Image (tube, helix red, strand yellow):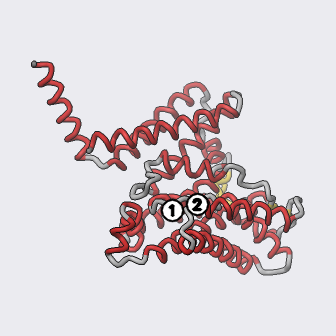
Amino acid sequence: MQDAQALRAKQAADAGLLRRFSLETLQVGGLALAIVVFAIIVQLNFPVFLSLPNINVMFVNFLPEAIIALGMTIVIITAGIDLSVAGIYPFSAIVVGLLMLAGLPIPVAILLTLAAGAVVGAVNAFISNKFRVHPFIATLAILLILRGVNIIITGGSPVSGFPEGFAIFGQAGIDMGGFTLRYSVFIWLGLALLTGYLLRHHRFWRLSYFIGGNRRSARMSGINVERYLVFVYMLSGTLAAVAGIIVASQFNAANNSYGQNLELRVITAVVIGGADLNGGAGSILGSMLGVLFIAMIYNAFAMSGISTYWQDVVVGAMLLASILLGEALKRRRA
């Protein structure tokens, strides 16, 4: 009898703790703790893991995923998905390169490329809204189309020979003694801070939570859901274009092979960071921690010499564990 009373008391205490902390706080906090523990373990085995040059390498290698994850976070919060980013990413790198080779000034080529990314995002939203096609199918179709277009316009060959001034976005930076802290990191950081602030404090951006949580209620409240989704997918396409421009600058070349499986890594990072694929939950901070965790895993595997095939096994297991943890926390709160 006493054991049963003690169990009920413990369950009540656990429920009270869950009520005091949001699901987002618990998941993001748990992820941050996992990052710290993982970093300590790897550092003990590979002392260069937390060195500034290696941290810089992790940032540079996963910068495209980090930028694209900003838009993907908002898409998933609205209960959507955007697979087309893996096509927009190389498409933008190719377009900005071809425009510059055609003689357009660098700023004009960049603006036109950003506009092209936004147009692709608008097409995604139009197909989904107009024909009531699930975003997964609509964006998958656009992804496949763009992959074909990328090969057609390049002939399967890399595009290179860009103007020297273009290198500032992906190669130039601040000399830190042993490495260069690239300006592209500051571009990502500025976009992340701006997006995170707007998503948390600006009423228009916070509508994404309302729409993702209950789209029918949002419509009944007078919100033009379809128009809002156009904005969200255009934002996602534009940020994918930013990532494409940076990678073209980083390598001074563009290739249709860029972005293989990028969409899966981005979605995994966002979900690990606490976003709910059913909509209504997610944060920029959580998504950035998710990208960081995946970057650390890939970097640790590269240092250890373990087969790269195990990377996907570990990341997939993390994704599954994150989803199961989120569902368990929901049930406990209920």
Q: Are marks 2 and 1 in contact (CB under 8 Å)?
A: yes
Q: Residue 30: where, in percent of width, then height?
A: 40, 39
Q: Residue 161: where, in percent of width, then height?
A: 87, 66
What residue do we see at 74% from left, 64% from top? 145
What residue do we see at 61% from left, 49% from top? 264
Q: Is residue 21 left or right of residue 62?
A: left
Q: Quadrant of residue 306?
A: top right
Q: Quadrant of residue 280?
A: bottom left
What residue do we see at 63% from left, 53% from top? 263
In the picture, which quadrant includes the N terminus? top left
Q: Which residue is mark 2?
A: 82
The label on residue 240 is none
Sort mark 1 into few (<14), some (14-19) or many (20+) by Cα contacts within 10 Å: many
Q: CA distance from mark 2 to mark 1?
A: 7 Å
The amino acid at mark 2 is Asp
Q: Is residue 246 visible?
A: no
User: Tag 1 or tag 2, which sits nearer the N-term?
Assistant: 1
Q: Nearer the viewer, residue 221 or 260?
A: 221
Q: Nearer the viewer, residue 71 or 301?
A: 71
Q: Which residue is mark 1?
A: 75
Q: Nearer the viewer, residue 72 or 141?
A: 141
Q: Residue 19: where, in percent of width, then height?
A: 23, 46
What residue do we see at 35% from left, 44% from top? 26
Q: Judging from the image, what secondary structure is the residue with disc 1 in?
A: helix
Q: Is residue 19 left or right of residue 221?
A: left
Q: Is residue 257 left or right of residue 27?
A: right
